[in-house]
Amino acid sequence: MDNTLFIHNTLTRKKEHFEPINPPFAGMYVCGPTVYGDPHLGHARPAITFDLVFRYLLHLGYKVRYVRNITDVGHLVADLDEGEDKIAVKARVEQLEPMEIAQYYADRYFVYMDSLNVKRPSIEPRASGHIIEQVLMIKQILDSGYAYEENGSVYFDVEKYSKTYEYGKLSGRVLDDQISNTRALEGQEEKRHPADFALWKKAQPEHIMRWPSPWSDGFPGWHIECSAMSTKYLGNYFDIHGGGMDLLFPHHESEIAQCQAAIGHESVKYWLHNNMITIQGQKMGKSLGNFITLEEFFTGSHRLLQQAYSPMTIRFFMLQAHYRSTLDFSNEALQAAEKGLKKLLAGYATLEKMPSPPNSLAGGMPSPPTPLDPYLPSPPTPLPGGEGRIPDLQRSCYSAMNDDFNSPIVIANLFEGVRIINSVADKKETISGADQILLKEIFDTFLFDILGLKEEKSNDQREMLDNLMQLILSIRQKSRETKDWGTSDQIRDTLQKLHITVKDGKDGSSWETE
RNA sequence: GGUUUCGUGGCCGAGUGGCUAGGCAGCGGUCUGCAAAACCGUCCACAGCGGUUCGACUCCGCUCGAAACCUCCA
């Protein structure tokens, strides 16, 4: 049986068999951040979602090129209706060069995504570095007749386009509805049709971010960068385009139209969209006062947060929900996730401490293939065989991932693995040596490689702590053997104050940190 | 008003036309010097109203409720 991946394509609203255009290569483009503010939860969801996709495709053996853009040209400020660029406004307010703003927040974005253990994409192109490509694409659209110039600005002719093609096929919108819903035409006299969108915009004198073009000194419209950069790095027809559901319309809808007009065909085979997050049932927004940055999460400094939540807690929490579901943040839910993750990692630690099974192929298990291994077989790889509940568990993890990246089911399976590990450690169950090795492989593969979770303490500290704790616990054990409960409890209580919990078991004591 | 996505137990969150999600919390037990952890057992569901069906939480319709985007704009 093959390891067959199905992914939900927004375009067809169905789960489709993932068949890359040029196997074993797979191309994925994801809309990245506009770098004019601190990274927040809204940035974390798509980053983690498509990190999961990236990691799983790599695991399956595809040679993935993952492109995620940095928008440093700037969308316009939504709440300030001045027709000004978000980054430009920020720059003026803070008395900085616009690129200083973009650089500062791009750096912040990278740091926080690193802390969430989000793998860096293969390419992270910046919109400002691809003005030439965008201008070229606009020319192509003009040549094909689906755009017009007006006072130094260029607009996409949606009305003409929709006579031949279906503008709205991705988001399910009907152009006629949009016309009938449109009222006055104030402020858009340059456009022939209210649904038209800008490809190039002439800069007003006060507009500080501007580039030369055949039409005017100005700046590109906010959809063209993704069309230009995705096709530059992934080709005119590529596998996956991802982003948040909020980008469905008009952004991705317009990308489809732009590529169709410029290239002559659509450029994307599978559209993937992650759902949004809410905070205590409400949408996250600056005006609602529930806008929480990642920094505030990690330090617990926001008034809605009862405590700090670690990056891995956030990551685990997000992966406990399917990427196409809305996800609600609350202290209660986050604390539950924190405990759940701790249990999972503690289970893995228990497994690691188990004696190596007799007759085991000590160190003989083949290590999982790395993505750059040139001898990797072409995907899809066969699903692992074997009989028994551990191989079943492994297959169950694969089938969950193959079912549109169902990470919550993978996690549920890992908890079942933890239950088995703990039962074995309690000597209430036994497993074969082969199963023990396989169990570890399952955790290494799914928990660490694919879900991208990790122990949050550094190895150096861990090792020193291990040695110290071994010393302390051996002293305590001696006092327990002489029933010197005073000393034994004093050690345990003092350690507890340092947030180290001692657990006495049949085979001696173990410990863990909070 | 339109488009889209949803509405599951105390909380979060999967899934399915008839068969256990899982985590956190609660309750009862086992273990333990005590504690913690762990293990076993257990309680609490499928927004409401109709319809299809031998049977629906799962399909269809309506109602109520929620979220995103659009209805200004680059």
Image (cartoon, coloured by chain):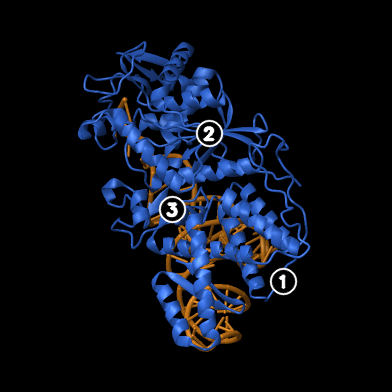
How far apart marks 3 and 2 lie (CA) works out to: 22 Å
Quadrant housing residue A281? bottom left
How far apart marks 2 and 1 lie (CA) works out to: 44 Å
Shade of chain A as shown in the rendered figure: blue
Mark 3 vs 2, N-terminal side = 2
- Provide the chain ID for the residue under circle 3: A
Please name the amino acid that badge 3 sits on.
Pro
Is any atom of residue A406 visible in this view?
A: no
Q: Nearer the viewer, residue A241 or A345?
A: A345
Q: Please name the residue that numbered disc 3 is placed on.
A: A311
Horizontally, is A182 left or right of B28 in the view?
left
How far apart marks 1 and 3 lie (CA) works out to: 35 Å
- Provide the chain ID for the residue under circle 1: A
Mark 1 vs 3, N-terminal side = 3
Whether callout 1 and callout 3 share a subunit is answered yes
Q: Secondary structure at mark 2?
A: loop
Please name the amino acid that badge 2 sits on.
Ser
Q: Please name the residue that numbered disc 2 is placed on.
A: A122
Image quarter where the C terminus of chain A lies is bottom left
Q: Nearer the viewer, residue A70 or A250?
A: A70
Q: Tell me what residue is drawn at x 37 percent, y 54 percent.
A: A298
Indicate the position of residue A151 as horizontal and vertical percent values: 29, 13
Whether tag 2 and tag 1 are in contact, CB under 8 A, the answer is: no
